[in-house]
Amino acid sequence: MDKWLKKDLEFIWHPYTQMKDCRDFPPVLIERANGIKLYDDKGRFYYDTISSWWCNVHGHNHPRIKEAIKRQMDSLEHVLFAGFTHKPAILLAERLISISPKGLTKVFFSDDGSTSVEVALKMSFQYWQNNGIRAKTKFVSLDSGYHGDTFGTMSVSGVDLFNKVFSPLFFRSYKIPSPYCYRCPMGKKRDSCGIDCVEPLSELLKGRSREIAGIILEPLVMAAAGMIIYPKEYLMKVAALARKHNVHLIVDEVATGFGRTGKMFACEIAGIKPDFMCLSKGITSGYLPLGVTLTTDKVYKAFYADYKENKTFYHGHTYTANPICCSAALATLKIFEEEKTLEKARKIMPLFAAGLERFRQLPSVGDVRHIGLIGAIELVKDKRTKKSFNFKERIGLKIYREGLKRNLILRPLGSIIYLFPPLCVKKDEIEDILNRTYAVIKDI
Ligand SMILES: Cc1ncc(COP(=O)(O)O)c(C=O)c1O
């Protein structure tokens, strides 16, 4: 084994990895990257088909993001964010508010996706406490949603494979069925259903809204659950129910934000106005870690009080609003405008959708779903019964390894293969990625 990989395995414990697997199949040593390609130490390239865990937007090695980072390094690398502020954070907050759904007027910074969600949960909870409505202490979430790996976010997540072992430590929350059209929890078909899967939420709120602080969900795409894409009407109904029953609506746009669905934010497609919006990943185009929670004036005012009233939001992280991260985010947003990223990506989207539809004809493909530049192919043992592969068969691992041979980074979620390329992907690149992915599935 290569000396670097030997050292890696000696000293490092990788995330979401069974380290024993690495003895026969060590991690890939990446040395550089450009555009949507990563290169290993031998110069072999890999398409970054999953945007380096769903965060790269404008491609690797983008000169303007690099320049922004370097420029910021020359003036200020970091300062604590309580009692001090800086221009990159101020400009970024202003810019984010200007592109976010109406009503979101305040920005709270943190470090990553999980912390942006923790902040929303804590703010929502404390909002009701500060207003003297003490019974509102619980959250509702989708039974296969994913919001991060901290205890708060795991408590409102539902991917059992990741979380079950920790479940005795979670706070209690209500789970509702996920709007998974291919495996409809109500046994209906999308073309004839009336979004009946929202009924359990409606019933829950009728009976228990007095103890519910908020509903949290990923808008339109339940990413870690297997890129489950659900109808905008579901999101609209959830938003209307939240409003009607006086509970907060928290949208977790950590994966869907920054253009992935064809709009800057997925909740724009449903035209909803959330009380909280959580952002991270694409905010810096994947260059540096940053989390943001946007909320309303109404929430902000519930904390704005005389010090003695003890309504302060006591939450913060050391690197909150780091100036270099904020500068990378500002450059990211500027590139959206100046390079017309969304307009260009929207031209690729129909080609991406049509290319994915071709996969339906493969015998092991049960479902194909796509929105914007997010696409998923669900493999099944039997198309008619929709019988899934058993987790222990490790079909995902086989696909991952086969993908690498064909210069693709495919990291299936169970037996769901997905593509989540950077928005800067070009027509010929997406065609090549689709052809290579097709060949991987056909061979397996
Ligand atoms: C929707 C969603 N929320 C939250 C997170 C957690 O983000 P992070 O890994 O940056 O903590 C993720 C990560 O994949 C996510 O997809």
Image (cartoon, rainbow, N blue to C red):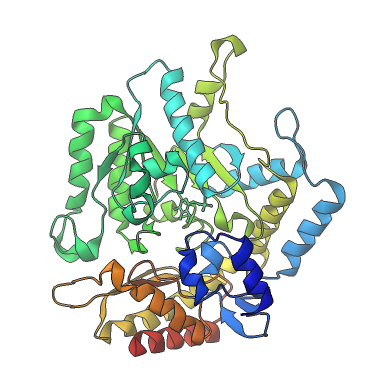
Quarter of the figure with the C terminus? bottom left
Residue 326 in view in this figure: yes
Where is 307 relative to 157, above or below?
above
What residue is shown at x 76% (from left), y 42% (from top)? 87
Residue 351 vertical position relative to residue 206 in the rendered view, above or below: below
In the figure, is residue 349 to the left or right of 239? right
Viewer-side residue, 285 vs 192: 285
Residue at 52% x, 49% y: name it. Answer: 113
Q: Quadrant of the N terminus?
A: bottom right
Spot the residue most to the top: 308
Residue with the most extreme right position: 74
User: Residue sitting at 35 percent across and 59 percent down?
Assistant: 225
The residue sitting at 44% across, 48% down in the picture is: 252
**Residue 103 in view of the camera:** no
Report the front residue among 381 and 33: 381
The image position of residue 299, as x and y in percent, is: 49, 28
Q: Choose between 248 and 167: the one closer to the eye.
A: 167
Whole-percent x and y of residue 8?
63, 67
Residue 264 at x, y percent in the picture: 51, 57
For residue 69, which quarter of the picture? bottom right
